[in-house]
Amino acid sequence: MALNILDWFTDDGDDVIVKSLTSKGTGKEAVNITVRDIRKGIAMDSRGYENEVVLFLRKNKADR
């Protein structure tokens, strides 16, 4: 699926997976982080554990 910058604002983003990470809950299962999860700030795993989604911005290595 091709991602257009306007899709971030007009689409709910539930089908656009940004990254897959490990849940902090019991079982340590993989959780797909979607655009919708980033907007809400929470990604829930299949067992119902709510993982907080936090974004960090940093400079390029050449600019540090």
Image: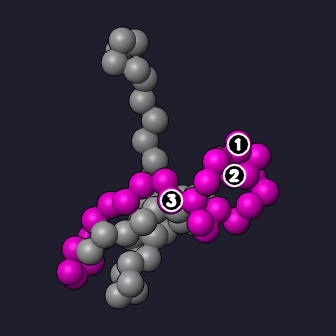
| 18 sits to left or right of 48 | right
Q: Amino acid at mark 1?
A: Ile
The residue tagged with tag 1: helix, strand or loop? loop
Q: Position of residue 51 (x, y in %)?
A: 38, 70
Please name the residue shown 35% across and 87% down the image. 47
Q: In which quarter of the view is residue 25 placed?
A: bottom left
Please name the residue shown 36% across and 12% down the image. 62
Q: Amino acid at mark 2?
A: Trp
Identify the residue under disc 2. Answer: 8
The answer to whether marks 1 and 2 mark residues whose Cβ atoms lie closer than 8 Å is yes
Q: Is residue 64 magenta?
A: no
Q: Which mark is residue 17?
A: 3
Identify the residue under disc 1. Answer: 5
The answer to whether marks 2 and 3 mark residues whose Cβ atoms lie closer than 8 Å is no
Q: Position of residue 3 (x, y in %)?
A: 65, 47
Is residue 30 something that shows in the picture? yes
Q: Earlier in the sequence, mark 3 or mark 1?
A: 1
Task: Write the start and end of the magenta stretch as one range.
Answer: 1-28
